[in-house]
Image: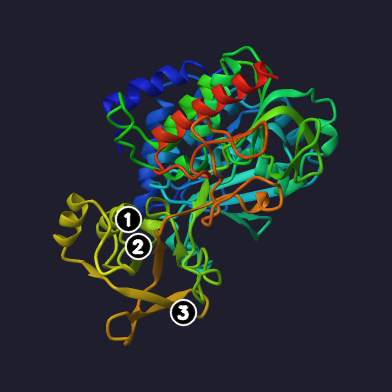
């Protein structure tokens, strides 16, 4: 296969950054896929004198390890690392070639301290925008610690393994042969899960913050930037950096930016935050907040952070249908992400629950892969924009069913059918299928606030005024966790700025 001219030009610039010699050790056969991998590797090896290519026996064919002549790196790619995984390949090449991974020193220290053999395998699809986060994190761990190894397995070339292990969601990670995790995870979360969480002692020396932002999505980052620009001590407690935006592929309504993608946008936002003195504490879940002389935020590991003001920007998560089988078959046919998991359902019948913009967009995307797509909408009519409705109705392999209530998702080891009730006739119907994509909106991540004294409305949203203030003195909130009328990235960013300015105003008046 020939890389296009633009990609080769960019790749050439990266290859100039290699600091030491690198070897592609490849296990190849006579099949078509092996030919593609061989051509890919040899084309890249021909672009740099520091890269050599050799055959070697590996567990899977086709696959290849990126290593140095004198040492093993522990990084292997089974299949072609193209699509979203091309960046994972480039970063692995540079890191094995001597470039230090761009992670905090505290993360490097934790990885190097792991004293047990960890062999990770990650199953991905090349259209999955969440997979690279996991692949790149595990590759970094493999570069930094010789006891850790990682294989990225491209599902398209290893369909037999996907079927045998009944993998129906990506990324799916196995550790030492046992299923370890599924879905997007940060490097902090992977380390916590594999080696244990960060000790509360790590937070013992934290000074009092002027503003402590809880959450790392658009609202939280905007709040942190606005606070830090005021020259006050600012901290961020972040469970998953980027929040829900990381699950958004196409963003076309960011004013001034006709098109971007969620992970790219949040990478730019993080780079912006890093221009200021913001203490970002990643991979940390807040479990309670209380107001004494200061505001105290307790973390899951028992650490307590103190601040003069706090801004809650904890976002929201996908709403569940709450029917039998939904949780039982999670990652076994039930999922939320059509972009990540859609390729696993190529040629199969699937259902999308929800007729809003997200649901209809999902149906349109899946129609290009699935054999047939059924859209189930509770209301008598779809809620999506008319332009999306027109597009979905024009697709021959999409059936829209309105005014129905999902009753159950059934199967044995994986999803086999969905049943629903016609709300007009009360008749029950069953559709045989293999995948269910739930797209019925969001629920605020505020369950941990119910006994905190922070006022919530009937939907669990934090009630704020036009300054972002909650009812608790010194506590502010912004974004999708609040009672804002509309849930949009740009609105959350504005609300984060408002809350930070409100917190600053509160501080100077004390």
Q: CA distance from mark 2 to mark 1?
A: 10 Å
Position in image of residue 96 (x %, y %): 59, 28
Describe residue 303's horizontal placement relative to residue 442 as left or right.
right
Evaluate if marks 3 and 1 touch, with contact meaning CB atoms under 8 Å apart. Answer: no
Location of mark 1 (residue): 362
**Label 3 residue SS:** strand
Q: Nearer the viewer, residue 358 or 335?
A: 358
Q: Residue 307 lies in what quarter of the image? A: top right
Evaluate if marks 2 and 1 touch, with contact meaning CB atoms under 8 Å apart. Answer: yes
Q: CA distance from mark 3 to mark 2?
A: 18 Å
Name the residue: 49% across, 74% down: 323
Position in image of residue 221 (x %, y %): 54, 28
Circle nearer the N terminus (3, 2): 2
Circle nearer the N terminus (3, 1): 1
Comparing marks 2 and 1, which lies closer to the viewer? 2
Q: In the rendering, which numbered label is found on residue 410?
A: 3
Q: CA distance from mark 3 to mark 1?
A: 22 Å
Location of mark 2 (residue): 354
Name the residue: 47% across, 79% down: 411
Describe residue 13's horizontal placement relative to residue 404 as left or right.
right
Residue 429 higher or lower than 131, as above or below:
below
Name the residue: 25% across, 57% down: 368
């Amino acid at each position: 296969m020939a890389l296009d001219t633009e990609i080769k030009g960019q790749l050439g610039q990266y290859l100039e950054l290699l600091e030491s010699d690198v070897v592609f050790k490849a296990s190849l056969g006579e099949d078509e896929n092996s030919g593609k991998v061989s051509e890919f590797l040899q084309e890249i090896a021909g672009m740099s004198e520091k890269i050599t290519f050799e055959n070697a026996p590996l567990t899977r064919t086709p696959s290849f390890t990126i290593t140095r002549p004198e040492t093993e790196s522990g990084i292997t790619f089974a299949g072609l690392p193209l699509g979203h995984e091309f960046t994972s390949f480039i970063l692995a090449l540079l890191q094995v070639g001597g470039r230090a991974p761009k992670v905090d020193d505290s993360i490097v220290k934790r990885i190097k301290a792991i004293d047990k053999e960890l062999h990770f395998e990650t199953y991905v699809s090349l259209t999955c925008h969440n997979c690279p986060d996991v692949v790149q994190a595990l590759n970094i761990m493999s570069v930094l610690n010789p006891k850790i190894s990682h294989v990225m397995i491209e599902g398209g070339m290893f369909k037999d393994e996907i079927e045998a292990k009944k993998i129906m969601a990506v990324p799916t990670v196995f550790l030492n042969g046992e299923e370890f995790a599924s879905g997007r995870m940060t490097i902090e979360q992977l380390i916590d899960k594999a080696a244990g969480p960060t000790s509360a002692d790590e937070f013992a020396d934290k000074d009092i913050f002027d503003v402590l932002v809880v959450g790392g999505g658009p609202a939280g980052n905007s709040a942190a930037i606005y606070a830090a620009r005021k020259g006050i001590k600012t901290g961020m407690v972040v469970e998953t950096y980027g929040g829900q935006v990381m699950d958004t592929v196409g963003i076309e309504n960011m004013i001034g930016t006709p098109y971007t993608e969620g992970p790219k946008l949040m990478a730019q936002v993080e780079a912006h935050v890093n221009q200021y003195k913001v203490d970002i504490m990643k991979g940390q879940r807040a479990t309670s907040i209380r107001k004494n002389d200061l505001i105290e935020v307790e973390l899951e590991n028992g650490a307590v952070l103190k601040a003069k003001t706090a801004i809650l920007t904890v976002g929201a998560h996908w709403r569940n249908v709450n029917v039998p089988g939904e949780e039982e078959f999670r990652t076994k046919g039930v999922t939320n992400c059509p972009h990540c998991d859609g390729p696993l359902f190529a040629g199969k019948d699937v259902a999308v629950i929800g007729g809003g913009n997200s649901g209809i967009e999902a149906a349109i995307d899946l129609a290009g892969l699935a054999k047939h797509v059924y859209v189930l909408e509770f209301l008598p009519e779809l809620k999506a924009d008319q332009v999306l409705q027109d597009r979905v109705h024009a697709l021959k392999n999409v059936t829209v069913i309105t005014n129905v209530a999902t009753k159950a998702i059934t199967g044995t080891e994986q999803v086999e059918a969905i049943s629903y009730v016609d709300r007009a006739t009360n008749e029950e119907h069953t559709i045989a299928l293999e995948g269910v994509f739930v797209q019925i909106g969001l629920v605020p991540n505020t369950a941990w606030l119910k006994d905190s004294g922070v006022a919530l409305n009937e939907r669990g949203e934090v009630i704020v005024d036009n300054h972002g203030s909650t009812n608790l003195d010194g506590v502010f909130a912004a974004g999708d966790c609040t009672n804002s009328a509309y849930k949009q990235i740009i609105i959350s960013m504005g609300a984060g700025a408002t809350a930070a300015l409100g917190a600053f105003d509160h501080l100077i008046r004390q």
